[in-house]
Structure formats: C-alpha cells, structure tokens
Amino acid sequence: MTTTALITGANKGIGHEIARLLSERGITAIVGARDEERGRAAAGRLGLPYVRIDVTDEASVAAAAKWIEAEYGSLDILVNNAGVAGGVGVPSAGDAQAFRDVYETNVFGVVTVTNAMLPLLRRSPAGRIVNMSSELGSISLALMPGSPYWDANFAAYNSSKTALNMITVCYAKELMDTPIKVNAANPGYCATDLNGHTGFRTAEQGAAVAVRLATLDADGPTGAYLEDAGPIGW
Ligand code: NAP
C-alpha cells in the first residue's frame, strides 16, 4: 500500500528536503506549494506529485484536499511546514497588522490545512501530523538571559510558533484516542531564504527531525516538542 504525505511550502528550503527525504523512504510525498511554477519545478526535480496550496487561502486548501482524496483516497502524513518570518522585531516595532500577517501563515494556516486534511488522515492506519515549529517559540529558552534566544526577540514570529506549539498539544489531545500523532518539530537554525541563509545548519539537517516525526511508529510520542537531540523546553 502506498504511504502518502503532504508537505506544505515544499518548493524550497526545509520543506523541499522533507519531501525529498520522505520520498527516499518510498513515501509518495506530495509537493505542496502556493506558486504553481515554483511548485511544479520542485516536484519535477524530485520526481514527485505537486498540488497547489496556499495555506492562507481556504479555497485552495479545500481544493488540495479534494484532489488528494480523488488521487489517493486518504493521507498518512501531513507536514505543516509553510512559514514566514515577517519583519517584526521587538513588539513595539510592529503594528497589529504585521502580527496578523505572520499569524495568517504560521498559525491560522496550520489550522485551516489540518482541519481540511483531518478527514483524510483519519482514514490512515497511522496518521502523522508534524508542525514545523522553532526553538524561537520556546518561552523557557526565551527567558534564559545571555542566551541567543534572549537576544532573538522577534515578537510576531516567536509568538506565532509558541501559539503553534499549543495548537499542536490541543490537536494531540483531541486525537489521543485515534492512531494519529501530532508533534512539533524544531529544525534548528538552518540556512534558507527565511533568514537570508545565515543559519549554520543545512536545510537537509533541519528536515531530519520532521522526517523522524512523520514516520514514528505506534509507540512514538504525541503532543511533543522535539529536535534532533530529543524534547526541548516549552
Ligand atoms: P523558506 O526557505 O523561506 O521556505 C518557506 C516555504 O513556505 C516556501 O516554500 C514558501 O513558499 C512557503 N510559504 C510561505 N507562505 C506560504 C503560504 N501562504 N502558503 C503556502 N506556502 C507558503 O523557509 P524554511 O527555513 O525552509 O522554513 C520552513 C519552516 O521551518 C517554516 O515554518 C519556518 O518557520 C521553520 N523554521 C525554520 C528555521 C530556519 O532556521 N530556517 C528555524 C526554525 C523553524 P514561497 O516560495 O512561495 O514563498
């Protein structure tokens, strides 16, 4: 039986590497991307199917779910990877709209996509949802004076990932009596367009934890916040 995965924002960066690494495991990894040209180019390079999905556009998300249902009948893995950094630094530097813009993708987009894909994930014998969070969403790390997390005071982005962490926990609890596992992944600081390629890890290294969580077996965790080395502080 084919194992299917949808990765949002898979035309580049960490999402691209997640799709590639999942496909190396024999999984049909669907390249989700909002821009048709960039998405088809990436899917062509990887030899994988493409579906158009803009996580902030409910109609495009519904159409993607309909297409996956028609093509595959169900979905085994959802990786909510699409994300934006936004330009907001300290909170007083951004107005509410600047926060809203970041939340549209990083928070509300995840809810839209997850709710649209859940009926398909429920048909899987072992559904897995991976939310691409960040160590910058960790409140305990943000409160460590002298650490790089103390200095990285990006109010909109960081708080969007904190919200995503709680949303991960809420879905995990709702789905506790089903085979579906829902976890948050921290890829670490990776060189991608998101940060002007300043990260010291590769996108492939960042993808590894998501791939691990996407392919957990039945005794794996749910409602966890994990990086390569294991759980990180909320
Ligand atoms: P990236 O290279 O900038 O890729 C982001 C991806 O998200 C792109 O494919 C982008 O598509 C897509 N995207 C943005 N808005 C979208 C929307 N509305 N609908 C669909 N796709 C959308 O960034 P990345 O570093 O790989 O980031 C991937 C995830 O990892 C993000 O959630 C990010 O917050 C998280 N993360 C990254 C780091 C890091 O150090 N890089 C660290 C921690 C967490 P377009 O090409 O069309 O813009």
Image (spheres, helix red, strand yellow):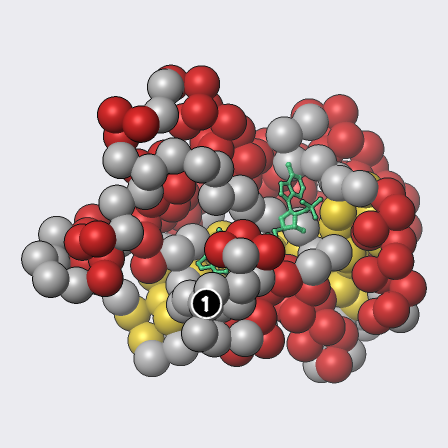
Quarter of the rendering occupied by the N terminus: bottom right
Q: Is residue 207 left or right of residue 119?
A: left
Please name whichever residue, 115 or 57, is drawn nearer the observer in this view of the structure: 57
Q: Residue at x 59, y 56 (%)?
A: 193
Q: Is residue 198 above or below residue 6?
A: below
- The crowding category of the residue bearing disc 1, from other C-alpha atoms within 10 Å (few below 14, some 14 to 19, many at least 20), is some
Examine the rendering and report whether any part of residue 40 can be seen. Answer: yes
Q: Is residue 202 above or below residue 149?
A: below
Q: Position of residue 160 (x, y in %)?
A: 38, 38
Q: Is mark 1 within 8 Å of ligand 1?
A: yes
Q: Residue at x 69, y 59 (%)?
A: 12
Q: Is residue 81 above or below residue 155?
A: below
Count of number-bearing discs: 1
Q: Is residue 151 left or right of residue 172?
A: left
Q: Residue furthest left?
A: 145
Please name whichever residue, 15 or 212, is drawn nearer the observer in this view of the structure: 15
Q: Quadrant of residue 188?
A: bottom left
Q: Residue at x 85, y 61 (%)?
A: 43
For mark 1, give the secondary structure: loop
Examine the rendering and report whether any part of residue 127 can be seen. Answer: no
Tell me which amino acid carries mark 1: Gly
User: Circle 1 is placed at which residue position?
Assistant: 199
Q: Is residue 89 left or right of residue 124?
A: left
Q: Position of residue 192 (x, y in %)?
A: 57, 62
